[in-house]
Image: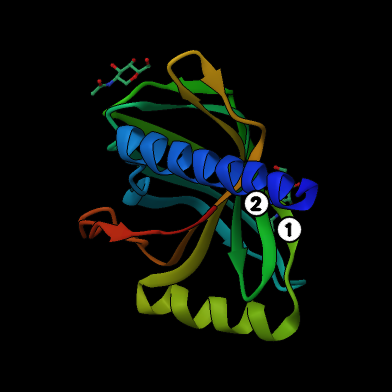
C-alpha cells in the first residue's frame, strides 16, 4: 500500500516535471546562434627565414541571435588564428551583452609578433602567400550565459570555428562570406 502510494507520487512528479520542461521549451523555442565571417584581411605580413612570422589579421564576425526570448551574456571571449594547428595570433574581446533578435559585429584585430612556425608550416605559408591567398583557421571561444526573462543560466562554453577562412593578400579581391561552425 505504502509502496503503491510512493510510486504514484513519484510518477505524478515525473509527469509534472516533464510537462513543465515541454511547456518552457515551447514558450522559449530556442534557436541556433548564427555566426558568419564577413571580412578578413592581412597586413604587414613578414615571414623571416628563421620561420618567425609578423602579421596583423583583421576579421569581422557577424553574430546573430535569432531568439525572441533568449538574450546572451558573452562574459569571456578569446579569439585565435591557427595555421596548421598552431596558434599564430591570439586576442581577447571585451565582454558584451547581446539582446534578443540582435546582430552584433565582432571586430577582431590579432597580431602575430615573431610567432614561430614549424618548418613545413612556414614553407607552405610561403607558397600560399605567393599564390595570393592563404587558408586560415579562425576560432573564438567564449564563456556565455543565457537570459530568459529574469532567469539566467550557468556558464557554458561556446566554440565558433571559421575554417577555412580564405584570406586574400591583395585588398582588391573581395572576401566571400563564410558560415562558421558552432559548438555549444
Ligand atoms: C617582427 O617585429 C619585431 C618588432 O617590430 C621585430 O623585432 C622582428 O624582427 C620582426 N620579425 C619579423 C619576422 O619580421
Ligand atoms: C545589438 O545590440 C547592441 C548592444 O546592445 C546594440 O548596440 C546594437 O545596436 C544592436 N543591434 C541591432 C541590429 O539591434
Q: Quadrant of ligand 2?
A: top left
Q: Which residue occupies 51% across, 21% down?
A: 96
In-front residue for pair 165/172: 165
Q: Which residue occupies 44% across, 42% down?
A: 19
Q: Position of residue 97 (x, y in %)?
A: 48, 20
For label 1, the SS is strand
Between the C-alphas of marks 1 and 2, the distance is 8 Å
**Residue 86 image label:** none
For label 2, the SS is strand
Q: Position of residue 21 (x, y in %)?
A: 47, 41
Query: Is 57 drawn above or below residue 154 in the view shown?
Result: below
Q: Residue furthest front?
A: 1
Q: Using residue 154 as the reference point, say whether residue 181 is left or right of it.
A: left
| Quadrant in the picture for residue 130 | bottom left
Dot placed on the residue nearer the N-terminal end, 1 or 2 = 2
Number of callouts: 2
**Residue 89 image label:** 2
**Residue bearing the label numbered 1:** 115
- Tell me the crowding category of disc 1: few under 14, some 14 to 19, or many 20 or more residues within 10 angstroms, Cα based: some
Q: Position of residue 81 (x, y in %)?
A: 58, 57
In-front residue for pair 110/144: 144
| Quadrant in the picture for residue 92 | top right
Q: Which residue occupies 60% across, 49% down?
A: 11
Q: Using residue 86 as the reference point, say whether residue 126 is left or right of it.
A: left
Amino acid at each position: 500500500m505504502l509502496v503503491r502510494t510512493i510510486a504514484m507520487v513519484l510518477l505524478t512528479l515525473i509527469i509534472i516535471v516533464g510537462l513543465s520542461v515541454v511547456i518552457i521549451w515551447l514558450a522559449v523555442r530556442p534557436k541556433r546562434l548564427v555566426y558568419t565571417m564577413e571580412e578578413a584581411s592581412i597586413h604587414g605580413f613578414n615571414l623571416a627565414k628563421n620561420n618567425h612570422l609578423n602579421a596583423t589579421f583583421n576579421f569581422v564576425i557577424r553574430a546573430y541571435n535569432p531568439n525572441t526570448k533568449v538574450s546572451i551574456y558573452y562574459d569571456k571571449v578569446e579569439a585565435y588564428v591557427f595555421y596548421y594547428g598552431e596558434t599564430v595570433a591570439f586576442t581577447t574581446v571585451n565582454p558584451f551583452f547581446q539582446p534578443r533578435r540582435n546582430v552584433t559585429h565582432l571586430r577582431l584585430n590579432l597580431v602575430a609578433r615573431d610567432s614561430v612556425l614549424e618548418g613545413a608550416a612556414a614553407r607552405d605559408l610561403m607558397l600560399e602567400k605567393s599564390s595570393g591567398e592563404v587558408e586560415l583557421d579562425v576560432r573564438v571561444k567564449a564563456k556565455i550565459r543565457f537570459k530568459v526573462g529574469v532567469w539566467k543560466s550557468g556558464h557554458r562554453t561556446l566554440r565558433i570555428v571559421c575554417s577555412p577562412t580564405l584570406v586574400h593578400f591583395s585588398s582588391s579581391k573581395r572576401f566571400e562570406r563564410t558560415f562558421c561552425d558552432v559548438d555549444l
